[in-house]
Image (cartoon, helix red, strand yellow):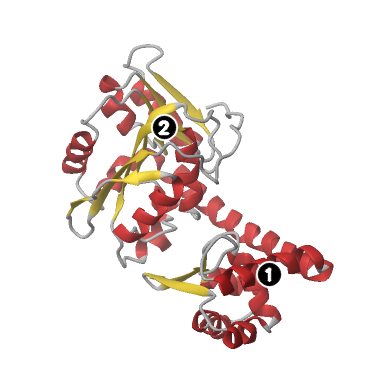
Amino acid sequence: MKLEPTLRALADPTRLRIMRLLADMELAVGELALVLGQSQPRVSRHIRILCDAGLTERRREGSWVFLRMAIGEDRAPPLGRAAARLLSAGEADDAGFAARCAEDRRHLAAIRAGREAQAAAYFARHAAEWDTLRSLHSPDAPVEAALAQALSGGEIGALLDIGTGTGRMAELFAPRAAAVTAFDKSPEMLRLARARLQHLPAGKVDLQQGDFTALPFAAGAFDTVLLHQVLHYAQEPEAVLGEAARVTRDGGRIAVVDLAAHGHEDLRTQHAHARLGFSDEQMLALLTAAGYAADPPLALPGQPLTVKIWTGTRLEVPHPLSKEPRKALPA
């Protein structure tokens, strides 16, 4: 980083607003345009200036471009740390700027809430045909066999199935688990899961409703955490994995089954996917940031999409995204 380009890049109110929004999370350029009330080409020009100065970084996903902070108060280089501290102090000390930033965050929250409502409506409409819809993207049998093998190296213990859907993964792993918690946000999905799992012994499976960014469980409550074809629905996958890490015991395991990075925009527009899969580099960064030591990924090529299985072990370190447990909602 160089001083003059850094100062020029920050000498604009819109770019200052962008930097404060990105301090909280990675955002799509389209989201920034909606929050800022500016055209996407104009926002893209601001982003180019910020990226050229080394303050932000771009990541392309299909036809969408995501933007994230390239600086931080605890990250090198020193000039980047200083710029991050300046931005934080500016919001703390400048009442007008703080009010503008707060309004931007409220607007962003409303945009994302609308998208989440659309996704919830999609799940409610398609709950009864969910297993069939999922199998359209990749065959289930080889994925399930590979997942079972990936989790065969030790005891499954207490298993949390995040985004259980119709309960297929809970059913598959119940014989090997000490207990299974099947967790989903959709009441319609949980009703189907309850019917599917009713043949299992009493007390074997606990169905709970809630949000995967605010899990209603104590820290370290589970030996194994599973997210099967779930993470691509997350607006903030880092928050989801942060919560997963919080409830995984030290030395416990995580398995993420999801699509490899792809360009099928129809999954975003027709099937409520928030992310067009994940690259190995993305998933390694997400798991590492959450506090897991990642294993080599496993690929299962399909037509038209490839499924990946990423696994990891929870490290014995506190995680910065940890939260207090939330109260569960009735299923």
Measuring 55% from the left and 45% from the top, which residue is drawn there? 321
Residue 110 falls in image quadrant? bottom right
Q: Position of residue 4 (x, y in %)?
A: 60, 88
Label 2 environment density (alpha carbons within 10 Å; few <14, some 14–19, many ≥20): many
Count the marks: 2
Q: Which mark is residue 195?
A: none
Instruction: Check the image and name the residue furthest to the top.
Output: 202
The kind of secondary structure element at disc 1 is: helix
Instruction: Check the image and name the residue furthest to the front.
Output: 78
Q: Is residue 69 above or below residue 201?
A: below
Amino acid type at mark 2 = Asp
Q: Position of residue 320 (x, y in %)?
A: 55, 46
Measuring 68% from the left and 84% from the top, which residue is drawn there? 11
Left or right, 279 with respect to 302, comes to right
Which one is nearer the viewer's eye here, 25 or 212? 25
Q: Position of residue 132 (x, y in %)?
A: 28, 43
Residue 292 falls in image quadrant? top left
Name which of mark 1 and mark 2 comes first in the sequence.
Answer: 1
Residue 278 shows in this picture: yes
The kind of secondary structure element at disc 2 is: strand
Measure the C-alpha gap from mark 1 to mark 2: 35 Å
Residue occupied by mark 2: 250
Label 1 environment density (alpha carbons within 10 Å; few <14, some 14–19, many ≥20): some
Left or right, 259 with respect to 186, comes to left
Measuring 47% from the left and 73% from the top, which residue is drawn there? 57
Which one is nearer the viewer's eye here, 275 or 196? 275
Amino acid type at mark 1 = Leu
Measuring 58% from the left and 57% from the top, which residue is drawn there? 112
Residue occupied by mark 1: 87
